[in-house]
Image (cartoon, rainbow, N blue to C red):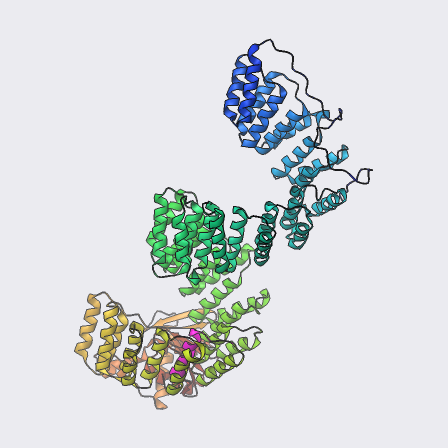
């Protein structure tokens, strides 16, 4: 344990500013012998004059002239030369002066030697400084010790600095304010903070706390950097008898860096009220605080202050203004950000990156293109991008679905040696993943030398979104092996992946991991669990998670309402909505989509109108296109096609393809040819390459036997290279997903599956099932139509589930398209014949089959 021995005197006075008179500590400079050279005095006076007027290089030239004349300045002139080199940062010139000193053979005094220590300290050659210090012997004075402590502290040799400070005490010297400030800087880290606190006490006892602001500033820095003890640091600030603008700025900055943004702003206001004038560093810090808290109003006031005090030309302040307006763009301030940017006369990488990032993050129409344009202008202006610039531009390329342009941007990052930086690599992975190019995303991930949690989360989320949960889970295990530990985002992505494929087994495994990891009470995770269980067909498990939540937000309630709606439990969905309003949670636009969907799935037309009309009246939510599409769906399912058509024509804005596609689907179900043709025409006007319009119209013609029209549509699709999405169904057994297509025979258990299908066909026909060949949209014989029906993917998946799962477990089948009417009828009979519960999720909703009935009550 370290201890400090105080000298016998009870109180120390501040060190004198006059040179010490103790001959044992400092030798006076020896007098130069009288020179016979008449030019010496002239040259020496010229050298001093050149130094006084700041012409260092001319002074060095004069020194060279003196050397050529075999003469040299006196020690006082050499001292002035060294100090000028140090002050101007001309360290190489300082080394040249040192060489001339050695050549002069003058006996160096402590003033010269201390300057040499300072010189080599500032140019990073601490070993040279240490050598000079050790060679001084009795010439060492307090300045020498302080310079050496400062040298070690400034060169990240904290232990050496502390050790030298202790040697100073042992050698009988008493530290002054500069020495204290230096050793305190050395203690500004977690390893040395305990020593720093002891020195803190030493400073208080010695009376040097108020000797100079540098001691108080060093203490503030040490407490924040060493232990994040902002409270004690602020107490030090408050107790400082003397403060200047630097002190205030330091405390404001440390508040900011420690996450105390509000306190930083309050302190800035106190600074102004105390009569101190903020400089560009203060203003930059407070503008950053406004950015973090999105205090646009205060930021604007600070901007006017900047203009008044003439700091608008400062690059750092201007960059902070660009950044503030850009990040507060939700309040419509991106234009202001651009104005500040355009007014800047000197653009650097910070200003370019701030405005580019602002455009990318704003999400406005055309903003990603503008970000890419600005990046090109930046390159043309010969400003080299940094890793943050590349990260933002790659995000813009992802938003634009332009991975090829992104690859060109990335090649620039490679040239500049920034490709291996995490944020650049992560943005590249994200760009590929969001473009559906998972192979390229995986290559980019594998090429990253140092992967962080964001790297893993990005690739895991990509695989989860593109229904490759196996890869997602493999990477999750790899992440756990690295020791980094998964975050809530990782688990949420995995749960989303399990939900997308209906892999409830994997979802349950993740739930178990969450319980072990302590994340089970996290709001975001609970919301993801509700969604996962609901989308995997276990609505009661979802409800159980919801009931155990201590803190529910609008997403929690909306997820549960959506779940009940998708499962056809409209009364429970609407009851949940009423409870949500009772507890004071305000619904959002997504909540109303869920409520309207609940009404649609069970034919609650009047309730649908009621909730649609209440959106704006009761909650100020203006209906969007999706809400109008829900109302069209409600009317279309109910067969009110004329009313639905009138509703579309009365919309306050032009109906998009989604609305007309919803209406066309209803026309196809109810066989309304004329309205269906009109809907298809409206869709194709907006999107000529929409395959859904062709397919729905083709099905409408097929259901009414218009095979020539069907042939024309299929020919048109072929000519335009439009492909119908292939129907497929899948089922999870023992955490493995088994996928089937129409007439699929590729499964290893194909023979057993079709044997089961044949037996089921016999059983359900005895119970009254009659194949509905009207759902075969091909012009073939009835016998062949019946064969087609028996080989639909959902029937194959159900048969596989029956032979592969225990009788006590429900069979959960998932289909990418809408389940056909014949399969719906057949599965009702299968549930009766096998006494099994069968849950089918299609593209629209869930169907719970049990004992010959379905939860949709045949309204779907």
Q: Quadrant of the C terminus?
A: bottom left
How many numbered marks are there?
0
Q: How would you classify the magenta stretch by its main secondary structure?
A: helix
Of residues 104 and 533, which is closer to you in this image?
104
Q: Is residue 107 visible?
A: yes
Q: Residue at x 56, y 32 (%)?
A: 87
Is 588 magenta? The answer is: yes
Of residues 780 and 386, which is closer to you in this image?
386
- The residue at the far top in this view is 36
Point out the stretch of residues depicted in magenta: 585-600
Pinpoint residue 654: horizontal percent, then vertical percent. Answer: 28, 73
In-image side of 81 versus 391 (left or right): right
Pinpoint residue 104: horizontal percent, then vertical percent. Answer: 60, 16
In-image side of 581 versus 156 (left or right): left
User: Is 585 drawn above or below residue 104 in the view shown?
Assistant: below
User: Is 430 drawn above or below residue 90 in the view shown?
Assistant: below
Q: Residue at x 54, y 79 (%)?
A: 583
Q: Residue at x 27, y 85 (%)?
A: 642
Pinpoint residue 643: horizontal percent, then vertical percent. Answer: 29, 85
Pinpoint residue 808: horizontal percent, then vertical percent. Answer: 50, 81
In-image side of 659 versus 324 (left or right): left
Q: Quadrant of the N terminus?
A: top right
Q: Is residue 428 visible?
A: no
Is 100 magenta? The answer is: no
User: Is 52 drawn above or below residue 432 in the view shown?
Assistant: above
User: Is 347 drawn above or below residue 761 in the view shown?
Assistant: above
Q: Quadrant of residue 13?
A: top right
Of residues 46 and 612, which is closer to you in this image?
46
């Amino acid at each position: 344990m370290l201890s400090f021995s105080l000298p016998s005197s009870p109180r120390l006075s501040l060190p004198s500013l006059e040179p010490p008179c103790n001959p044992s500590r400092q030798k006076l400079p020896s007098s130069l012998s009288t020179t016979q050279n008449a030019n010496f005095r002239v040259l020496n006076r010229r050298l001093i004059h050149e130094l006084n007027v700041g012409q260092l290089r001319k002074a060095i030239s004069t020194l060279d002239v003196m050397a050529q004349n075999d003469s040299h300045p006196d020690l006082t002139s050499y001292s002035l030369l060294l100090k000028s080199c140090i002050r101007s940062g001309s360290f190489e010139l300082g080394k040249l002066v040192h060489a001339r000193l050695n050549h002069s053979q003058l006996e160096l005094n402590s003033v010269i030697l201390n300057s040499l220590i300072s010189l080599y300290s500032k140019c990073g050659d601490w070993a040279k400084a240490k050598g000079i210090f050790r060679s001084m012997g009795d010439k060492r004075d307090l300045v020498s010790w302080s310079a050496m402590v400062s040298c070690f502290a400034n060169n990240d040799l904290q232990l050496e600095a502390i050790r030298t400070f202790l040697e100073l005490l042992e050698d009988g010297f008493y530290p002054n304010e500069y020495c204290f400030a230096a050793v305190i800087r050395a203690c500004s880290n977690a390893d040395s903070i305990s020593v720093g606190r002891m020195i803190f006490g030493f400073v208080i006892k010695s009376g040097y706390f108020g000797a100079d602001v540098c001691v108080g500033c060093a203490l503030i820095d040490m407490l924040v950097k060493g232990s994040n003890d902002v409270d004690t640091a602020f107490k030090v600030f408050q107790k400082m008898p003397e403060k200047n603008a630097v002190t205030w700025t330091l405390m404001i900055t440390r508040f900011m860096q420690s996450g105390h943004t509000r306190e930083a702003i309050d302190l800035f206001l106190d600074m102004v009220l105390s009569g101190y004038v903020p400089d560009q560093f203060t203003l930059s810090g407070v503008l950053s605080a406004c950015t973090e808290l999105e205090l646009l109003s205060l930021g604007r006031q600070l901007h006017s202050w900047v203009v008044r005090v003439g700091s608008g030309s400062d690059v750092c302040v201007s960059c902070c203004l660009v950044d503030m307006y850009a990040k507060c763009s939700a309040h419509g301030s991106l234009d202001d950000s651009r104005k500040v940017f355009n007014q800047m006369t000197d653009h650097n990488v910070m200003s370019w990156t701030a405005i580019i990032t602002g455009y990318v993050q704003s999400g406005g129409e055309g903003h990603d293109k503008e970000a890419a344009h600005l990046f090109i202008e930046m390159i043309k202006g010969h400003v080299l991008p940094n890793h943050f610039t590349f990260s933002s531009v790659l995000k813009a390329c992802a938003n634009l679905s332009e991975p090829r342009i992104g690859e060109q941007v990335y090649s620039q990052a490679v040239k500049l040696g920034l490709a291996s930086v995490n944020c650049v690599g992560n943005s590249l992975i994200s760009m590929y993943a969001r473009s559906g190019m998972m192979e390229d995303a995986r290559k980019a991930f594998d090429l990253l030398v140092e992967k962080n949690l964001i790297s893993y989360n990005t690739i895991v989320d990509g695989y989860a979104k593109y229904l490759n949960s196996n890869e997602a889970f493999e990477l999750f295990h790899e992440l756990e092996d690295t020791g980094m530990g998964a975050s809530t985002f990782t688990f949420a992505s995995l749960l989303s992946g399990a939900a997308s494929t209906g892999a409830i087994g994997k979802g349950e495994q993740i739930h178990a991991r969450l319980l072990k990891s302590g994340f089970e009470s996290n709001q975001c995770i609970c919301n993801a669990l509700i969604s996962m269980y609901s989308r995997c067909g276990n609505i009661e498990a979802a409800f159980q998670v919801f009931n155990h939540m201590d803190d529910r937000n609008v997403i929690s309630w909306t997820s549960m309402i959506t779940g009940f709606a998708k499962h056809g439990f409209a009364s429970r969905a609407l009851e949940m909505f009423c409870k949500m309003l009772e507890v004071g949670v305000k619904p959002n636009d997504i909540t109303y989509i869920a409520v309207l969907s609940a009404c649609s799935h069970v034919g609650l037309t009047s309730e649908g109108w009621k909730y649609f009309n209440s959106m704006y009246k009761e909650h100020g939510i203006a209906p969007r296109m999706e809400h109008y599409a829900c109302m069209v769906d409600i009317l279309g399912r109910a067969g009110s096609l004329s009313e639905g058509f009138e509703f579309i024509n009365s919309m306050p804005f032009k109906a998009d393809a989604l609305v007309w596609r919803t209406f066309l689907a209803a026309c196809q179900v109810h066989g309304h040819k004329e309205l269906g043709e009109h809907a298809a025409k409206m869709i194709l006007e907006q999107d000529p390459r929409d395959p859904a319009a062709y397919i729905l119209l083709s099905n409408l013609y097929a259901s009414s036997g218009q095979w020539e029209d069907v042939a024309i549509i299929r020919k048109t699709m072929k000519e335009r290279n439009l492909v119908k999405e292939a129907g497929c169904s899948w089922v999870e057994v023992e955490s493995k997903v088994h996928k089937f297509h129409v007439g699929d025979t590729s499964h290893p258990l194909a023979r057993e599956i079709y044997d089961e299908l044949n037996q089921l066909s016999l059983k359900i026909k005895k119970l009254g099932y009659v194949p509905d060949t009207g759902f075969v949209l091909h012009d073939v014989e009835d016998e062949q139509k019946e064969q087609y029906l028996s080989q639909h993917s959902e029937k194959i998946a159900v048969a596989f589930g029956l032979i592969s799962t225990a009788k006590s477990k429900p069979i959960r089948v998932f289909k990418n398209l809408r389940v056909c009417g014949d399969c719906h009828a057949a599965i009702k009979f299968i549930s009766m014949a096998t006494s099994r519960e069968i849950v089918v999720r299609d593209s629209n909703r869930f169907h719970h089959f049990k004992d010959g009935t379905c939860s949709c009550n045949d309204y779907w």
